[in-house]
Amino acid sequence: MLKTTAIVLALYLGGCGGVEEPTELVSYLQTLQRFQPFNQQVQRYISFFEAPGRPVTQTEVDGARTLLADYAQAVETLNTSSLKGDDLREAHHFYVLTCQHAQQLSTDTTGGISQQTRTVTFALHTLRAYITGRFYPGLGVMLAHRRIEGSLQPPAWPE
């Protein structure tokens, strides 16, 4: 068992198969900057919906749903056909699934405005948690694995 673990670790750290050039990862991280406006809007909706005593309208809930749908569409249509690294392709696939999942969660229209607000807020939180807790850290690991140093980091989530 220990020998198998050592072999798997050596293959991973040695970069055997499916690891893209560092420039591909750098280019992908630069491309992710175009999604920062979506992240800013997601954060604004979270703050808005969680503001105590603030009444929420159906138009605002529908606006958040539209944002999630637009975000999912934008991430899905990003041209990733040139990605050669398996881990980077898988990371992007996770990003797509995360956006689709959040968008799907937000589509529940049962209940009144209060219930719908909670549902959409949950979808927004889910999106933020997956991106900040799994997607961005995974990209950080890829940067470290490829020994890409300097100021290049995965995008920070807006406050």
Image (tube, grey):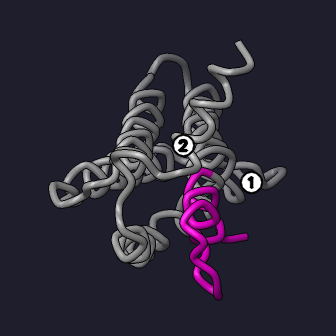
Is residue 20 rendered magenta in the image?
no
Q: In the image, which is nearer the foreground, mark 2 or mark 1?
A: 2
Q: Which amino acid does the dot numbered 2 rest on?
A: Tyr
Is residue 149 rendered magenta in the image?
yes
Residue that appears at 60% across and 60% down: 145
In the image, residue 108 lies at what x, y percent? 44, 23
The residue lying toward the viewer, choosing from 127 and 152, is: 152
Secondary structure type for disc 2:
helix
Q: Which mark is residue 54?
A: 1
Q: Please give left or right for residue 56 compared with residue 27 in the image.
A: right
Q: Which residues are magenta?
A: 138-159
The residue lying toward the viewer, choosing from 5 and 158, is: 5
In the image, residue 126 lies at what x, y percent? 61, 37
Dominant secondary-structure state across the stretch colored magenta: loop
Residue that appears at 64% across and 87% down: 151
Q: Is residue 120 above or below residue 145?
A: above
Q: Is residue 43 above or below residue 113?
A: below
**Other residues around mark 1 within 10 Å, as few (<14) / some (14–19) / many (≥20):** few
**Residue 32 shows in this picture:** no
User: Residue pushed farthest bottom?
Assistant: 150
Q: Which mark is residue 12?
A: 2
Q: Quadrant of the N terminus?
A: top right
Residue that appears at 43% across and 76% down: 26
